[in-house]
Image: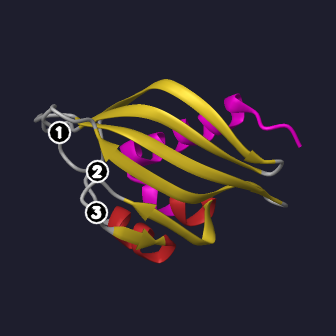
Amino acid sequence: MAIDLTELLRLEHAGWTALCDGSGGEFYGAVMTDDGVMVLADGSVLDRDAVVASLDDAPAWSAYEITDERLVGLGPDSAAFVYRGRAFRASGGPPFDAVMTSVYVQEDSGWRLALYQQTPVPGEESVEL
């Protein structure tokens, strides 16, 4: 199956939209693989259940930007989607600014998120996701 940048970008936008509207736990609970993990900017590594629990209580973001998208093929049924993301809280303060990598695998149900990793952009003030 051909890997489509547009489809993976659509998934990333859907994830960020869920983080903005407060449904992030539900979204990532559905899109992550059973053994999927997130490696966050603060160094924590969360499995799918921990991601869902943390997002259920997280304050929503008010806006986000995705730029500098790159697709790295990892095989016929997997890809890494790399981009720079900036997210903003309604309450103000510095944006969260990081380079992010989402590794997706194709399963019968569609693309699933196996690994997500954040690297803060150096030298800029930012808050953690």
Residue drawn at x 46%, y 40% as measured from the top left: 17
Work out whether 37 lies above or below 96: below
Q: Amino acid at mark 1?
A: Ser
Is 20 covered by the magenta stretch?
A: yes
Give the labeled residue for mark 2.
129
Spatial CA distance of label 2 from label 1 is 9 Å
Residue that extends furthest to the top in the rendered view of this protein:
68
Spatial CA distance of label 2 from label 3 is 11 Å
**x then y, percent, for residue 76:** 83, 48
Give the labeled residue for mark 3.
43
**x then y, percent, for residue 4:** 75, 33
**x then y, percent, for residue 82:** 52, 37
Quarter holding the N terminus is top right
Q: Amino acid at mark 3?
A: Gly
Spatial CA distance of label 3 from label 1 is 15 Å
- Disc 1 is placed on an element classified as loop
| Residue in front for this viewpoint, 71 or 109 | 71
Give the labeled residue for mark 1.
126
Residue drawn at x 49%, y 67% as measured from the top left: 37
Q: Nearer the viewer, mark 3 or mark 1?
A: 3
Residue neighbourhood size for the residue with mark 3, other residues' Cα within 10 Å, grouped as few (<14), some (14–19), many (≥20): few
- Disc 3 is placed on an element classified as loop
Residue neighbourhood size for the residue with mark 2, other residues' Cα within 10 Å, grouped as few (<14), some (14–19), many (≥20): some
| Residue in front for this viewpoint, 33 or 68 | 68
Is 12 covered by the magenta stretch?
A: yes
Residue neighbourhood size for the residue with mark 1, other residues' Cα within 10 Å, grouped as few (<14), some (14–19), many (≥20): some
First along the sequence among labels 2 and 3: 3
Q: Which residues are magenta?
A: 1-27
Q: Amino acid at mark 2?
A: Leu
